[in-house]
């Protein structure tokens, strides 16, 4: 380096000398040439230095290159090692994190394992200490258990397949059988008819019975049971449209199944309906039809009363209102009259049971909410039968008067109690009405038909006669002012009978016949008058009339026993006639002809009542008690 | 229920202490009321409308009870063929068993037993007017008939006793006076023979009452006042129909019959007032002034009218 600089400096000096010499060019040419040679030498030295430099540079370069290379290799190895470290670390981690599948398997607990596993698997001696071994043993046990269960499972699968195959076969056999059975049934038809065993009919009725609503079902069952057990002249059949009943039943089942859907449907329907604008009358008719909807099946009960005819009762169930209505029909009855009209025949079978309104308190509310008139209107218009209370009881529906609760669902116990009683009442009602109609006809013709035991109780000859028999209204009865008018019920049929004694006394009897005649005796009110023109004694005192009224209303019916109870009306009228004879004889001012004494004591007691009770043994009238 | 429409109250009697009222009807029932409560009712304005029911009610049989009378401890009722007596102490304890009874037999061949129409207590003797034609006198201690007053020709309606005189009215139209010591008929009166009394409703006398000087009687004939000593007719009381009951009370004559009102007359025969009732005929009137003023009226109907003054009806008791 120094050499270089030295050389360069020398050159420079030379150069500068040269330059200086150059300024004076002639003198120094030799010097210049020397200097030039020197300079050339120096340049050569320079070249040599340069060459040396270059060589030196090259060597240094090679050195650094070699060092660099060494460094690179070290670097590479370092990197490799680092990578390896990373790998290995990763491997280590992976190994550490390695969870073998066996840890996922839930094994039975150790106690159970030691308990259950057989010796060769568990090997408790070696496994108790060594955890790994224990684990292995447990895994073994697990494997064995699973193998066993898999085998069982396969076995059960095969069994199942076999059995379902068998079921399929049997089903097929059954379905093949069905038409064959039907064919057999068909062929037994003529045989049934020969033997008069209505098996087919009965089966059909049973099938229909399954479609009946519950109240009618109870009614049908109880009536048929009663008919079979006690009374063969009663029969119950189911009539009506089977298809409609089936659709109704399915609709009911669908409704009760999913209610949320039906709500949706109802909304849709409502929306749809609003779009159709029907007239008010149509809407009302639609509401009416919906509310008074009758179940398509009805039960027809036929009661045959010997010699009197047949009663046909049709029981219909109104599904929305929840009550049962009855339509009555009378057939083959020889007697006709106002008392035997089918609509009113079974009214008031019990006191208060007019059948003119619904027994359920809820019906009024339902009708009012739908904007319709009360039920009674539809009943009198003939659109519905009559909802008698006894019909509700027969159908197992018990309505407690006055409560707002919905009626209790039909109960069998309620129906069973009442069948016999109701049938007897209905029969008795028909008999009583026929008898009464006959009596009324006879009385209207002027005769008093008395059965023998009753006429034996009365004197043979009567002077008083029945001169008129008219039908009157309850208002007229009340207006007459007789004592017992206060007891009159508006459902009674009222009549006015006039009895007359030839000597002048006239007795007006106001008779009220209850629908429950003859169980409820007639209500008789009396008024006494003197026939105009006849020279008759003073009319009898009011006490005598009171006593006679009491006798006719209370004593006469209570003295009739057994079969003659039905003849209470003519008995009452006949007693009144004989009593009129007595009144005539015992009236003050008149005398009793001694040759024909009817009484021992014309008056008795402080109220001076005449003897009104006839004693047939003595052929005389006595004062009754005492 | 129907039978009760025809209830007729025929007789009433106050108990000896004055605390109870007993009434008998035509079906053999006797009803007892507590008089103190009755008087309280009349004072209380609100309960004036209530129909008080009897405290006690029992039956003596089927036959009507036409006569009632009370002695110190017994209620004596006349029914058909029997005079029944009940102890008041028993009745109040609701023990309705008869204490004793006296049978009344018919005095001629009759097929029914005679009814007892009137009972009067005097001097420990019971005077019985019945369906027989005689008045029977029965000693209460021995309960044996001691005398029989014969003379009537038909059954007896009413018997009254005053001092030593017994007066009886009968269906035969005569009122006879008897001496109780000698048991003999003293005199008789026949109102129907008097032209101003006879009115064509019969000759029977059903109503009779006597004071020391006066007698009032009527029935078919008009109700009339008679002077006892002279046995002359003094005045006529005009009741529009036949008369069943007449009483002297507080200077007035109370009369009831087959009309719905109770008529009141002075002792001169002038009308003093009428009290309308709910009964269609009046059969019994009972009145007293001690300890409280009270008048009860019974007849055809189930009500007994109660009046605390002579002027008007206060309220009704129900027999049922």
Image (tube, coloured by chain):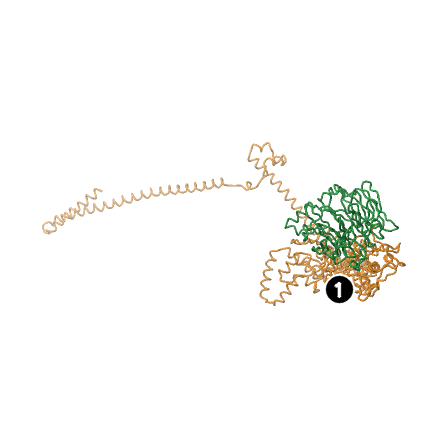
Chain colours: A orange, B green
Q: Residue furthest front?
A: B230
Estimate the x, y position of residue B308 in percent, counting from the top left: 67, 50
Q: Residue furthest left?
A: A27
Residue at image mark 1: A472
Q: Residue furthest right?
A: A595
Estimate the x, y position of residue A586 in percent, counting from the top left: 83, 58
Residue B36 drawn above or below residue A186: above
Q: Nearer the viewer, residue A259 or A527?
A: A527
Q: Nearer the viewer, residue A137 or A535?
A: A535
Q: Residue furthest bottom?
A: A279
Judge from the rendering whether residue A34 lies leftward or rightward of residue A201; answer left or right.
left
Q: Nearer the viewer, residue A149 or A98?
A: A149
Judge from the rendering whether residue B10 lies leftward or rightward of residue A293; answer left or right.
right
Estimate the x, y position of residue A182 in percent, counting from the top left: 77, 59
- Number of marks in the rendered image: 1
Q: Chain of mark 1?
A: A
In which quadrant of the rendered image does the N terminus of chain A lie?
Answer: top left
- Dividing the picture into quadrants, the one containing residue B197 is bottom right
Residue B269 drawn above or below residue A129: below
Secondary structure at numbered mark 1: strand
Q: Residues within 10 Å of mark 1 (few under 14, many from 20)?
A: some
Judge from the rendering whether residue A208 lies leftward or rightward of residue A258; answer left or right.
right
Q: Nearer the viewer, residue B267 or B18?
A: B267
- Asked if residue A280 shows in the view, the reply is yes
């Amino acid at each position: 380096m120094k050499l270089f600089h030295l050389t360069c400096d020398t050159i420079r000096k030379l150069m500068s000398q040269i330059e200086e010499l150059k300024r004076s060019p002639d003198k120094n040419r030799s010097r210049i040439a020397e200097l030039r040679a020197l300079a050339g030498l120096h340049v050569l030295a320079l070249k040599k230095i340069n060459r040396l430099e270059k060589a030196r540079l090259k060597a240094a370069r090679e050195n650094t290159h070699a060092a660099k290379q060494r460094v690179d290799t070290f670097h590479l190895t370092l990197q490799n090692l680092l990578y390896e470290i990373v790998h290995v670390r990763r491997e280590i981690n992976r190994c550490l994190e390695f969870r073998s599948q066996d840890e996922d398997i839930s094994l039975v607990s150790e106690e159970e394992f030691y308990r259950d596993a057989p010796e060769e698997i568990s090997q408790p001696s070696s496994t108790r200490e060594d955890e790994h071994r224990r684990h292995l043993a447990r895994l073994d046990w697990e494997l064995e258990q699973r193998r066993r269960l898999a085998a069982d499972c396969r076995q059960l699968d095969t069994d199942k397949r076999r059995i379902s195959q068998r079921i399929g076969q049997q089903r097929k056999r059954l379905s093949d059988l069905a038409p064959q059975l039907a064919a057999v049934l068909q062929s037994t038809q003529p045989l049934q008819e020969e033997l008069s065993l209505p098996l087919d009919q009965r089966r059909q009725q049973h099938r229909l019975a399954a479609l009946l609503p519950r109240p009618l079902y109870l009614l049908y069952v109880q009536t048929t049971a009663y008919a079979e057990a006690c009374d063969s002249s009663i029969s119950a059949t189911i009539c009506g449209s089977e298809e409609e009943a089936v659709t109704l039943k399915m609709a009911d089942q669908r409704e009760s199944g999913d209610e949320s859907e039906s709500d949706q449907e109802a909304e849709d329907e409502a929306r749809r309906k609003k779009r159709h604008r029907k007239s008010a009358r149509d809407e009302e008719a639609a509401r009416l039809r919906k509310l008074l909807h009758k179940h398509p099946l009805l039960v027809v009960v036929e009661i045959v009363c010997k010699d009197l005819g047949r009663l046909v009762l049709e029981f219909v169930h109104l599904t929305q209102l929840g009550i049962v209505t009855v339509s009555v029909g009378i057939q083959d009855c020889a007697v006709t009259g106002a008392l035997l009209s089918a609509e009113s025949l079974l009214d008031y079978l019990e006191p208060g049971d007019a059948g003119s309104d619904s027994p359920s308190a809820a019906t009024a509310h339902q009708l009012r909410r739908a904007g319709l008139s009360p039920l009674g209107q539809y009943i009198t218009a003939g659109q519905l039968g009559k909802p008698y209370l006894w019909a509700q009881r027969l159908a197992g529906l018990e309505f407690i008067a006055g409560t707002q609760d919905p009626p209790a669902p039909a109960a069998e116990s309620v129906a069973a109690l009442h069948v016999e009683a109701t049938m007897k009442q209905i029969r008795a009602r028909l008999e009583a009405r026929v008898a009464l109609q006959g009596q009324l006809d006879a009385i209207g013709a002027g005769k008093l038909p008395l059965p023998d035991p009753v006429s034996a109780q009365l004197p043979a000859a009567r002077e008083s006669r029945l001169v008129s028999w008219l039908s009157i209204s309850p208002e007229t009865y009340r207006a007459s002012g007789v004592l017992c008018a206060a007891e009159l019920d508006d459902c009674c049929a009222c009549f006015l009978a006039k009895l007359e004694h030839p000597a002048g006394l006239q007795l007006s009897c106001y008779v009220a016949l209850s629908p429950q005649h003859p169980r409820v005796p007639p209500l008789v009110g009396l008024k006494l008058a003197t026939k105009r023109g006849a020279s008759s004694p003073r009319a009898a005192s009011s006490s005598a009339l009171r006593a006679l009224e009491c006798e006719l209303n209370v004593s006469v019916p209570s003295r009739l026993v057994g079969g003659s109870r039905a003849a209470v009306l003519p008995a009452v009228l006949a007693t009144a006639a004989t009593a009129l004879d007595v009144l005539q004889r015992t009236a003050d001012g008149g005398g009793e002809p001694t040759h024909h004494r009817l009484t021992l004591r014309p008056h008795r007691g402080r109220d001076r009542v005449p003897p009104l009770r006839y004693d047939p043994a003595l052929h005389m009238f006595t004062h009754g008690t005492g | 229920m129907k039978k009760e429409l025809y209830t007729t109250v025929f007789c009433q009697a106050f108990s000896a202490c004055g605390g109870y009222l007993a009434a008998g009807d035509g079906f053999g029932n006797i009803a007892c009321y507590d008089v103190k409560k009755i008087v309280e009712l009349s004072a209380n304005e609100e309960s004036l409308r209530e129909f008080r029911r009897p405290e006690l009610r029992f039956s003596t049989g089927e036959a009507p009870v036409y006569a009632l009378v009370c002695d110190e401890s017994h209620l004596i009722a006349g029914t058909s063929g029997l005079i029944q007596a009940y102890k008041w102490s028993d009745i109040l304890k609701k023990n309705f068993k008869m204490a004793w009874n006296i049978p009344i037999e018919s005095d001629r061949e009759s097929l029914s037993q005679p009814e007892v129409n009137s009972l009067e207590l005097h001097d420990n003797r019971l005077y019985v007017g019945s369906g027989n034609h005689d008045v029977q006198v029965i000693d209460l201690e021995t309960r044996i008939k001691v005398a029989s007053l014969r003379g009537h020709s038909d059954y007896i309606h009413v018997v009254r006793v005053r001092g030593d005189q017994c007066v009886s009215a009968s269906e035969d139209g005569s009122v006879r006076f008897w001496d109780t010591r000698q048991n003999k008929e003293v005199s008789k009166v026949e109102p129907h023979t008097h032209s101003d009394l006879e009115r064509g409703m019969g000759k029977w006398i059903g109503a009779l009452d006597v004071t020391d000087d006066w007698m009032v009687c009527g029935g078919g004939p008009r109700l009339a006042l008679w002077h006892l000593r002279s046995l002359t007719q003094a005045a006529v009381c005009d009741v529009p129909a036949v008369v069943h009951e007449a009483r002297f009370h507080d200077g007035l004559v109370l009369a009831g019959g087959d009309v719905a009102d109770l008529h009141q007359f002075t002792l001169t025969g002038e009308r003093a007032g009428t009290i309308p009732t709910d009964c269609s005929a009046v059969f019994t009137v009972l009145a007293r002034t001690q300890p409280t003023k009270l008048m009860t009226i019974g007849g055809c109907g189930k009500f007994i009218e109660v009046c605390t003054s002579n002027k008007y009806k206060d309220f009704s008791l129900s027999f049922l």
